[in-house]
Image (tube, rainbow, N blue to C red):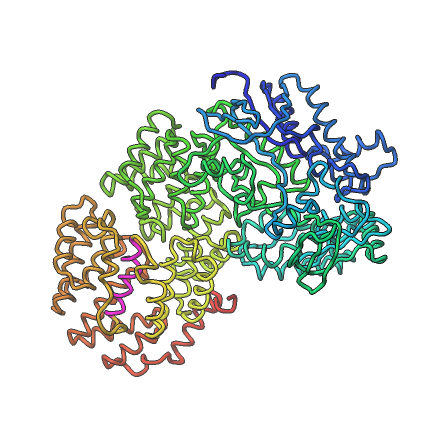
Amino acid sequence: MSWNSPSRHIAVVGAGAAGALTVVQLMRQAEGLGRTLEIWLIDPAEQAGPGVAYGTSDPRHLLNVPAGRMSAFPDEPEHFLRWLAGGHPRAAPGDYVPRQEYGRYLTEVLERTTEECRRTRLHRVRERVIAAREQGPGLTLRLAGGSKLRVDAAVLALGNFAPGQDWVGTELRESGRFVADPWAPGALDALAEEGDVLLVGTGLTMADLAVTLARPDRVVHAVSRHGLVPREHLVDAVPSAEPPSFDGSRGLDALRRDVRRHLAASRRARGDWRPGMDGLRPVTAALWQQLSTADRTRFLQEDLRAWEVHRHRIAPGTAAVIRELRASGRLRVGAAEVVHAAPREGAVSVRLSDGRELRVGAVVNCTGAQTDLRRTADPLVRCVLVRGYARTGPADLGFDTWSDGRLVPAVGTSAVRLWTIGVGRRGNLLESTAIPEIRAQAAEVANSVLTALADRRASRPTDRYGLSLSTTPEAAELYNQALERILAGNLGAEALLTEAVGADPDFAAGHAALALLGHECEAGVETASALAAARRAASRSADDRERSLVAAVDARLTGTEEMGKAALLGHIAEHARDALVVSAAVPTVSFNGVTCAEEAWALVEGLSATYGDDWWYLGQLAFVRQEQERWQEAEALATRALAAHPSAGHAVHARAHVFYETGEHRAGLDWLDEWIRRYGAGAGHRSHLSWHAALHELTLDDRPALLRRYHRELVASQVSGGRLLVDSASLLWRSRMTGSWSGELPLAELLDAAPEHWLDAPATAFAALHSALAFAASADLDGLGRLRAHALTNRQEVFPLVIAPLCDALSAVVRQCWQEAVLRLRPLLPLIARVGGSKAQHEVVEETLLHALISGGEDDRAAELLSARLDRRPSPLDRRRLGSVGGPREALEPSSGEGSRRAVDRSREGALSSRR
């Protein structure tokens, strides 16, 4: 079959509920689109539809969800009820019907859909898939019988894997009295009718088996570490509570408190906690995704079982049987683990961790499905992991997937046409096993598969702001993930972009973004290669907006300063929603920018109607407002942005500046330390926020804290790339200029680890500024001389205008020629903003001037400058220095007049501290 064949071939591996519903959605959607499909549904099971979950033959095994919520179709909520009414006219939405009835329903839905959809052919293959290999744009699947099947795409609907057996000793495993997987066909047939039974695990499987295995003369023992059993549904269901507006990014402890309050409110308003629990269902996946990796792991270790017994409840009829069995002593549930179990004289002798000893006829494994795919023996799963077609999901649950169910490949591997559904997505969604989730996923996966197999240019994907992307859906997904990280200032964007252009080498916007990151952010990217690839891709496969993007990035990286500026601003004028280019044009914590001061402000303010309440834009506007010294507005905007995206980099940066510029040094330190603790690990600008915290400590004249901060968060082992100079080296220079560091500055380790081109030939004036400070801090006059020569020959106007004279000024400071240093530094004060960066960063030149004035004995001029600084914000450091140069007594401490003036200012602007 050729790639251009009008018929697409799709394999669905697994014929349980997830696989059957995926096939149904593929057929229905293809029929609606007029598309021709051939689908192979592959599973050794005799019937398609029931699977393990609904294949039970025991009519006492009931659905754990009311019939009214079990439709196979998200857009036809009463479909199952209508089907059920055919055989059970009195069936009601709140009934909990036998699971085998639902299995028959799924089989019939599949059969009817197959009959009705004339454009699709369904092939039923009763074999097991044991391997997959990428072949061209599609895949070749190898079956256990030795045959091969070539398809354009495959969906893995693998269902639950057999329970783990780590706790089972060899003697028990080989005794013939151990049931490794109670849901395997015929697994319970060999159990004797007499004799007690031990169920290891106390979840939903235990409830089913306790009902099945109960006998008048038998005791069924059930144990687990916690001894918790599933709660029951209410007989008369109460409508779910409204989904709450929780923020998982605040951390697991805060989320626990929120959930407890939510359930308590449900009890007060509705008389029971269950409606509140059900109200969490629509937001569970989002909350799970907002938690940090560490908090997800903690949840699994500390909260999962309590969550499951409340979230996955049993039918009232099942609960009544369990209560009766427990009351009669025929079911005994305890909190214990199996310490030892071995066959003895026609039975199994078991010793439990609570000291009990049991003699039972059989031990049944009810510990629940294996969720860490690295530990499963399934050959297909092992194959796709080993070949890099997939990787394990967050918290090692299932596969890692994109939002449409497509498997995320291992780093450095291109995406293949593989999707998954159901339990395989637990790592990304947490809740992914019940029919309400499965049916929605089936529709999404079917749509994604059909979209991927359509003409890639027929309906192009878009970025997060609706701009078309000339690429494949998988590359677009990676690009959008990278774009969000860029806009938030988070780590990992370059790796995602590398994956995106690996998935589609003709993705012009992806290559251009990589080149821009390499130039602006020192992201470990081969900038020239990425730019060349962007040019090639734009000539072959790009729309007008993407060609304009590539041209703008090209001009920024290879042209003069004015050419780059004109190209970026021209692109924004035509494509205002291209947030990546807006980011590159505005000086921020991530980008150097091509505008400054009023021009940058006007650019950001002019985009208000374009971006509205977008969290990234609010952060950009917050930073503008703090530069305009409109502190209250900056604080409000940053708070709104952080409420939507707690790690939004521009908002965090803006708020850090508000604290500093308003002199709220103690409050700023506390807030920054907490933010760094919670979100710093994923932030690309973590070291810069550590620099901000250190700046508070410097200003507070707290030298021990400053030293601790540097050695904990800003040494070379904790910082990388240009930040070694921007944050670490610049702090050391300021510490020396303010007399806050005694002894030799630890510059050598920073210079050894810093990017060589930052020191030899920095590409931006901002980089050059910090290279100059590093050379000065290490007393490297030759380095300053080389940098000066580079600046004089650089085509960007700011280099000869600012960087070259700055090198001369710093050379004078190193040589202790104080009068010369003062003469050279003073004219740079109004020009330093041209290099990009913030006012707080520009102050390093003023700090150097102050040092030169004090060292040169010009106390009056130093006192004048220090007094002006104290008018801007309170600073114990500046008060100390003012005292050392004989400043006026009233300036040495905040006077009542100064305090009143600041109080008036804050009354006008709003007291920031009262809202923190």
Task: Look at the image and say whether residue 135 sits in the magenta stretch.
Answer: no
- Compared to residue 128, the image places residue 770 above or below, namely below
**Which residue is rendered at x = 70% and y = 19% of the image?**
115
Image location (x, y in percent) of residue 554: 28, 36
Where, by quadrant of the figure, is residue 181 drawn? top right
Q: Residue furthest bottom?
A: 889
Q: Is residue 310 visible?
A: no
Residue 126 image-quadrant placement? top right
Residue 91 at x, y percent in the picture: 85, 37
Q: Is residue 730 magenta?
A: yes
* Residue drawn at x 41%, y 63% as measured from the top left: 658
97 to the left or right of 502: right
Q: Main secondary structure of the magenta part?
A: helix
Q: Position of residue 591 (x, y in %)?
A: 34, 49
**Bounds of the magenta segment:** 722-737
Q: Nearer the viewer, residue 659 or 207?
A: 207
Q: Which residue occupies the foreground of this view, 771 or 893?
A: 771
